[in-house]
Image (cartoon, coloured by chain):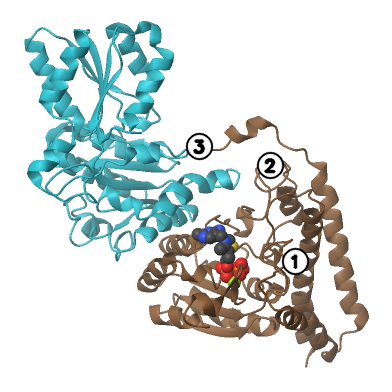
Chain colours: A cyan, B brown
Amino acid sequence: MTSTEITYAWAINHAMDEEMARDPRVVLFGQDVGRMGGVFGVTRNLFEKHGPERVRDVSIVEHFVVGGAVGAALGGLRPIAEVQFADFLLVAGDESFHKLPKWRYMHGGAFTIPVVIRAPSGIQGGVGAEHSQSPEGHYWHTPGLKIAVPSTPADAKGLLKSAIRDDDPVIFFETRRLYRVKGLVSDDPELLVPFGQASVRREGSDLTVVAWAGMVPEVLAAAEMLAAEGLSIEVIDPRTLVPFDWETVAASVRKTSRLLIVHEAPLTMGPGAEIASRAADELFAELDAPVRRLAGPDVPIPQNMALEQFCFPQVPEIVAAARELIRW
Amino acid sequence: MSDQDRADLLALYRQMARGRALEDRVNALTNSREFRGFFHPGRGQEGIQAGVCSVLRKDDYLLYAHRGLTYLTAKGMDPVRILGDFLGRVGGSTGGLGAGTVHCVDVENGIMGQGGTLGSSFTLSAGLGLASQVLKQDRIATAFFGDGASARGTFLEAGVTIAAWKLPVLWICENNGWAVSARLTDVQGTDDIAPRAAALGFYTEVVDGQDVRAVQAAARRASEKARAGQPAFIEAKTSRVEGHYTGDVQPYRDKDDVAQAKERDPLLLAQTQLIELGASDADVSSIWDEAVAEMAAAEDRARLSPEPTGDRIFEGLWA
Ligand SMILES: Cc1ncc(C[n+]2csc(CCOP(=O)(O)OP(=O)(O)O)c2C)c(N)n1
Ligand SMILES: [Mg+2]
């Protein structure tokens, strides 16, 4: 099967297009996903190809977007629901923290909830405190949800296809900074990326860095710079937070004896705390240095584009933190 | 006045009696502390639930509310499963997760559950209606709720979407004038809920919820509209006879108000109508006796099922 170089946004589009062609129960709704093709162009052509019955625009109704997706799944559809920004998922708090993860369990497992919520996240373009967040930690703290955080076009496609075929609810975080990034993506409509399998983005022996979504390119750039100094960094991208491939992380830490976690969400109670805590608990004897986290600062994200750059870890900080840990 | 009218009303009366007899058992379990959760009695509101469910098909969807149990049994659910949930038994519909009415489920009879947060059923019913429309199933999605829950923002968000997409959805507001201790007119600006639904584009009916035949007639018209793609809404004016939950002595409420509510009991009204239609006292009382016996036997059977062990909590989170 051939591969084509396409953007992360287009890879997501292809995943939806292929799955809608494969399964008539897959429907898509959200703001501007129809004729416009999405405010970021991610759903282009789907309305024309799959028709107004299955691709629907909605008004400003986030409670409906998430709650309606749960109801549609109860009724036998496999909805993909888009919120324009991941931040807006918090508008639908009851639906995303309660209905989506709990309806099946509360009712004794009587239902499956095959819903995918697509949520564009992260800092880009001066859109401010309520359009820039990375809220995956909130959802990781909520039992009953699977969470995908792809960092490459190939993973975006393969993970979204898996998400659509999954009988459990998935929150699919798309990094807006990556939408225009290109990469080779298989044209094989049956090539899925399984959940719960981390990808070792770069092999190394001195330090393990765990990063996902928009932080993966930054960490890889840092690793390249450190390589010039003779420092060898292993970069692990978990690709999904639920399920989380702890085995791959643990095996890497056993090899490097050092662990750094890098994420965009704020530091305090962020997802890195969970990984660090687990490492301290299970890998204490393996570690030659403290487990460290680099994360967004504990402030709302300002709209000023110069200032928002201070709200997620930058390459020089990653380089400095890595050096310090290796020389510990 | 025909034999058919009498038979129809007897059937409605039977469903109201079953709901009330089941509720009596749950109240007894609550008072004896064998059931230690909250139960919200539906005494006085059985006519709405029995009347609406009488026009639904087995495969029509039901999202019920917290008030009473009549919708569950009238829609076809086995009371053994319901009591199993109250008693926290593995044989309950939630497989031992119980305890209480909140999450009873019966997919075969279209009973799709209930959320613990009021107003959830607006968006969920919209989604169920969407599924029926896309899959060309001709099923309608119904959701029951109170006057209090009608104030939730989800009412508007789901309502506008249901109207825009012409989804086969029927909403039933049981307007009893109270939300716990809050009188409707103290916390909302109007007595009437239906005009809001009309403003969104719903077909609306306002009906005396104590008159089960009037409810049935309104529900017949409304469900036909919904099935044809005209979203519909019934506001049933009713009274809450008991407290918000079993054990609530209602210090916030006038004694007269409760006394009036008791006089307008839908079962008593139906009894009078039945006698007018030529039914005998014996016909009427035998229906009640049968309902009581059915629910006593259901409780005995529910008790035969074991309680779950602690590892039950880890079952069923994932598909
Ligand atoms: C979102 C939410 N807020 C509050 C509650 C607590 N609560 C449960 S029932 C109830 C009153 C509801 O009144 P109404 O909708 O009129 O129904 P009724 O009890 O009168 O049948 C309240 C406040 C809840 N379960 N969910
Ligand atoms: Mg009320």
Q: Amino acid at mark 2?
A: Gly
Mark 1 — on which chain does it sit?
Answer: B
Could you tell whether A180 is left or right of B112 in the image? left
Mark 3 — on which chain does it sit?
Answer: B
Q: Amino acid at mark 3?
A: Trp
The x and y percentages for residue B2 are: 78, 90
Mark 2 residue CB less than 8 A from any atom of ligand 1:
no
Task: Return the residue at label 2.
Answer: B96
Mark 3 residue CB less than 8 A from any atom of ligand 1:
no
Report the residue at 65% width, 43% height from top: B97
Q: Amino acid at mark 1?
A: Gly
User: Where B311 falls versus B237 (above or below)?
Assistant: above
The x and y percentages for residue A66 are: 39, 54
Q: Is there CB contact under 8 Å for labels 1 and 3?
A: no
Could you tell whether B68 is left or right of A162 in the image? right
Instruction: Tell me which label, 1 or 2, sits earlier in the chain.
Output: 1
The alpha-carbon separation of the residues under discs 2 and 3 comes to 17 Å
User: Where A112 falls versus A52 (above or below)?
Assistant: above
In the foreground, B183 or B155: B183
Task: Return the residue at label 3.
Answer: B318
Instruction: Tell me which label, 1 or 3, sits earlier in the chain.
Output: 1
Q: Which quarter of the frame holds ligand 2?
A: bottom right
Q: Which mark is residue B19?
A: 1
Can you see residue A78? yes
Could you tell whether B176 is left or right of A179 in the image? right
